[in-house]
Image (tube, helix red, strand yellow):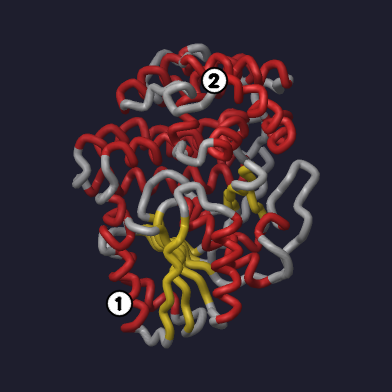
Amino acid sequence: MNFEFYLPVEIIFGVGSVDKIGEVGKRFGYRVLIVTGRKSSKENGSLQRVIESLRRNGAEEVLVFDEIEPNPTDKSVNKASEFVVREKIDYIVGLGGGSSLDSAKAISIVSSNEGYAWDYVNYPEGPRLIPFLNRPVICIPTTAGTGSEVNRYAVLSNPIRREKLVISHSLNYPKVALIDPSLTVSMDRRLTAITGIDALMHALESLTNRLSNTLAEELAIRAISLIKQWLPIAIEEPENLQARSYMSYASMLAGIAIDRKRVALIHGMEHPVSAHYPQVAHGEGLSALALAITDFNYKGNPQKYALFAELMGYEPKPHMAVKVLEDFLERLGMRLSLKDLGVEKEKLERLTEDVYMLSRGLFAINPVEPTLEDVQRLYERAYEGY
């Protein structure tokens, strides 16, 4: 058994932990920028709680950048980065869903180095620029799905190029993850399901891809078991703090798992979808693609797919992984097709090309290495609904 593990993120987990932000933040300076979305953190009160805690603990200047989109763009990251430099910000707080957390991490990189956001995204041939410095980032998730608070990834979209790519670098880790499950209570049923599916796909893909890391796989296994048990409860009983806590925990575990083992073809094929159709939530795109791709993948790693089926309460046979997902998505109201999401059939060829141009680095680690023709067929199967 051989593996490597690196996670330079301090994790503070528990109900009420958001109120520790001021005490934690003063380690890093006195001028802070909160990066968040346009509405939810204001409506659920978390933004005000963060501001008050920071001010109580001596923050001299607390500024807010609230222009982050659901699929965050390089444009908003560049704009915020200029603001950070101009205002001489010491550290950044990301508050919200994965879009806010990813943006906060990207803003840290861009504001601390030369160039712009798109210079740092990881094309298959590598990024154009390598960062050398960063500002401290504290991440406070208000959803349970992305795991961005504990990993080195920041996913950004470029609406001009119609591309969605990832900044991935050791400087992109947050300094601290403050995970307060009570902040996720305000999510409605749909958002709870969408973000929960993202966490499940992180766990499934990190468990089953061709990379090997025993510790990361253990985290993925635990995350799958928790999501199977608690996601339906969190949807049906949104005020259930036990369900919310276990979903926040599962999301965190799956976020660590993909940090070490990465994702695979489901994510690789979803990113072009939400790049071309930014109204599509990431979890919706994953749901639409998951069945067709799992049916394609399970023969490449039968042992792990059988384990997945067993963890989800089914007979431990590889092909049952497809049935597992089919039933679970149906139960959550997430049995979707690309057509349901507004994807145009004539765009499938372009999406296929984008997968090759932007995500072909995932082909070799996918349980079954796909050809371009395979990718096209999988999009076609997902278009009408598996």
Figure check: 130 above or below 188: below
The answer to which image quadrant residue 357 occupies is: top right
| Residue at position x 47%, y 25% in the image | 288
User: Residue at the location (34% across, 71% down)?
Assistant: 50
Give the left or right position of residue 182, taking residue 2 as reference.
left
- Give the image quarter of residue 352: top right
Report the disc number at residue 9.
none
Q: Is residue 173 above or below residue 27?
A: above
Q: Is residue 386 visible?
A: yes
Q: Which residue is mark 1?
A: 52
For the point 66% across and 22% down, the residue is 349
Q: Position of residue 89 (x, y in %)?
A: 54, 79
**Does residue 140 appear anywhere in the picture?**
no
Amino acid residing under circle 1: Glu
Q: Secondary structure at mark 1?
A: helix
Residue 67: x percent and y percent?
45, 61
Front residue of 285 and 256 = 285
Element type at marker 2?
helix
Q: Residues within 10 Å of mark 1 (few under 14, many from 20)?
A: some
Mark 1 or mark 2: name the one nearer the start of the chain.
1
Foreground: disc 1 or disc 2: 1
Residue 353 is situated, as x and y percent measured from the top left of the image, at 71, 28
- Gap between marks 1 and 2 measured at Cα: 46 Å
Q: Which residue is mark 2?
A: 294
Q: Amino acid at mark 2?
A: Thr
